[in-house]
Image (cartoon, coloured by chain):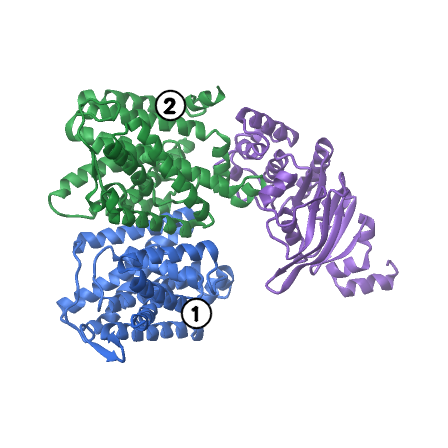
Chain colours: A green, B purple, C blue
Amino acid sequence: MGTLKDAFSFGDLPASERIGFVLFIIFCLIFPWFWGGFAQTVMIKFLLFCLYGLGWNLIGGYGGQVALGQAKNVGMSAYTVALLMVWWDIPFWVSTPLGVIVATVESFILGYFLFRLRGHYFAIATIAVSLVWQQLFINWDLIGGARGVELPLKKTPNFLYMLFDSPIYYHYFAFLLVMGAIFYMNWFRKSKLGYQLRAITSSEDVAESLGINIHWVKVKAYCITGVFAGMGGAFYTVNYNYIDPFSVMHLELSIMIALMTMIGGAGSMWGPIIGAMILIPLDCYLGAWLGGSGIIGVDFMIYSMMVMVIAAYEPKGIWGIIEKARRRR
Amino acid sequence: MALLEVIDLTKDFGGVAANDHISLEIQKGEIIGLIGPNGAGKTTLFNCIVGYHRPDRGTVRFKGKDITGLKPFQTNREGIGRTFQVLSISGDLTVLENVMIGSFCRTSDRPTARQEAFEILDLLELEKDAEAHLTELPVGTQKRVGLAMALATNPELLMLDEVASGLNPKETEEMVTLLQEIYEAKGLTLFLTEHVMEVVMPISKRIIVLDGGQKIAEGRPHEIANNERVIRAYLGEKYVRGRKDRGSI
Amino acid sequence: MEMLLPAIISGLLMGMLFALVALGLAIIFGVMNIVNFAHGEFLMAGMYTAFLTATFLSVEPLLTLPVAAMVGLFLGIASYYLLVRHLLKGPMIAQLLGTFGLMIFLRYLAMFIFGPDYKTLEHGLLIGKSIKWGPVVLSYSRLGTAVVSVIAFGIIYWLINHTRLGKALQATALDVEAAGYMGIDTEKMRGLAWGLGGATVGIAGALLTNFYYVFPTIGLLFCMIAFATVALGGFGSIKGAFIAGLIMGLIIDLGGTYVGPQHKFALIYLTYFLVVVFRPQGLFGW
């Protein structure tokens, strides 16, 4: 009972934040009534990245471990869902938990070894792992290799396989996932694991002297992040109906998730959402504007400049700036 | 059975014996002081007991159990708490939250942890600072928070690493009183390493002196104050000779 | 068996280049304990500099070395004064993010300016020619690269160990506060370390252009190699960087020959893991 209360009560946050949260919910709920088409696509992508970001915030924000390979979790789950559907006609609601389990188990094993590393070593290692997995998937003919996997057509709307014609269904589904993620994070930051994780980020030596098994806590956090990424991957699969190693396991995805959360404010409740709010529309509209002209690279140049500025002047991101402004009043 | 036994502990650092065959015993309920000039090996000994370093030779036993080489989180769960000289914790968490982390060591339930943390804060007269961030507080208060955090893990043996460093005379007095209070309230055994004699001399039952990695003296405070080897270690040969000439040794 | 000798020789030759690449990273880490994620991008910049200079000014590629070195020097110093200096004040996370951001920025800047195509040099002293030595065929470019790498390595080694400037650098690496008290301008030293790191890897890039493709994303690959090499040699050890470079070259070439060329990259990553997980201090590190 206490768990539910923790998840749903935002009482410890200032009124302004609670109001902002309610406005956010209302906005998401009424969105499909007013906008469609490209804006709808952007909105769904925004919600998906909120999910990714909230998950990454766990290990990267509260945990202070910059993991740059979440794409592998997205991809592994996406492939599990896609393949199980294509090969054995397994419904979404069965294949998704399996996909998430695959991603989590891999995270667990990887985390066990990788968390012996500190800081930079760890970050580079996560990039390397993700790249290796992507290479593997590209060369693995059994699962389609570079050709990818295309989902079979089914009669829509189909709640068993989560396949729909209209994006409105996906919008609300994504919204529900994000809500779930927010409530989970609300519970997490008040939980024992949440406190211990933050203690580790604060000072590992002190945390250890207080009886915290640092290695184990980091591994657990990393696995939970993997769950979020896995959920996102499953969603992506049924939303886009086609996956390949270049669209679900690419380095740019990992980078985007990390950069976005850092810019928004890693280690804060709302940081990932703010980051997504800024970067995803920017990414989509910039891409649409430049896509035709053949100019590439500008998007990441802009994001990386933002990150450098944030890293140099306000490592706590935009949320950090907001909090500082609030404290001054 | 002694609460803590250190048997023949040796720790080398790059060819230098930071701890050289050190043995000591601490009984339950004692207050033991560890002193010695800078570089004597006090912090190393501390770290070897707590598990931050692994001794090269020797054994550490706690409540009869061999804890040599166990990691700090494990020794903490066995019942050894420690404070840090410099609390390098970031300003993100409030004082209460920091202490709760210690409480979470003993329970998984947040309300319980919160309750216990409040009790500790009460004991150390920190209730009014519960919602403050560490970086906003003066050094004296920070030290008390460090104490609170260690206490929250419910240790039987509390190891204090230069808990009086950086305190002004008034704060030092308050610290001595505080240590007495928590010693009695929680039935602790205290092991302090200290430079500030005004703290360690009045409250310790026994003092152990290290110099150059070795244990050079052990005894009651007033014995140690007059011990020739100790004086030599701190003040040098000249002062020993001076006192001998005047007949005070 | 007949594959073994050429692979070993080729591996050692490439290894010398890797040693040079790793050297820059080792210097930066040694002097201020920050890891330059953008190291590979500095190499990439050196490559493009060499390529463009050689192609548009019709200059012999070898002569582009000083130009690439200058560009690398400039990039390194600019990175320090514009970004890294501020990062050092913050927590480690910020430092990591910051140099990571720099890496992404340079990578996509290159993509923006040059496009994603692979480019190669067509003409040059070293290009396309080789000599036969017993059962082994050695390409001029790899030979030349190895020779220049060793020379460059030697020069920098001499610079660091036998000049006043080098001693000042070492002092800053060992204890920045104490070095400051001795009258050493530690800010300049740090900037210099970055400049030196950039120049070193710029030269390596120019050499690499003689026989490797030039493309914007090559940075990440060599960043990995550099990391793996420095991790193997031990962060902060110059001697270690050299030996580890040779070992790395051997691993990649022998691995490529016996396991298959598409697995070369996996081998790099694998080596990196094994080293950092089982022997984090490397062979010679502190």
Q: Secondary structure at mark 1?
A: helix
State which quadrant residue C272 falls in. Answer: bottom left
Q: Nearer the viewer, residue A210 or A286?
A: A210
Q: Amino acid at mark 2?
A: Arg
Please name the residue shown 68% across and 42% down the image.
B172
Q: Return the residue at label 1.
A: C239
Up/down of A301 relative to C140, above or below: above
Q: Is residue B184 left or right of residue C8?
A: right
How far across and down, in percent of the image, does residue C207 sit? 26, 69
Q: Is residue A41 left or right of residue A260?
A: left
Q: Residues within 10 Å of mark 1 (few under 14, many from 20)?
A: some
Please name the residue shown 22% across and 52% down the image.
C109
Please name the residue shown 77% across and 58% down the image.
B231
Up/down of B46 relative to C27, above or below: above
Chain letter belonging to callout 1: C
Q: Nearer the viewer, residue A236 or B154?
A: A236
Chain letter belonging to callout 2: A
How far across and down, in percent of the image, does residue B207 sit? 77, 49
Q: Nearer the viewer, residue C230 or A262?
A: C230
Q: Amino acid at mark 1?
A: Lys
Please name the residue shown 52% across and 44% down the image.
A204
Residue farthest to the left, as pictured: A292
- Mark closer to the observer (2, 1): 1
Q: Return the residue at label 2.
A: A18
How far across and down, in percent of the image, does residue B201 sit? 76, 46
Q: Secondary structure at mark 2?
A: helix
Residue B87 - label: none
Residue B32 in view here = yes
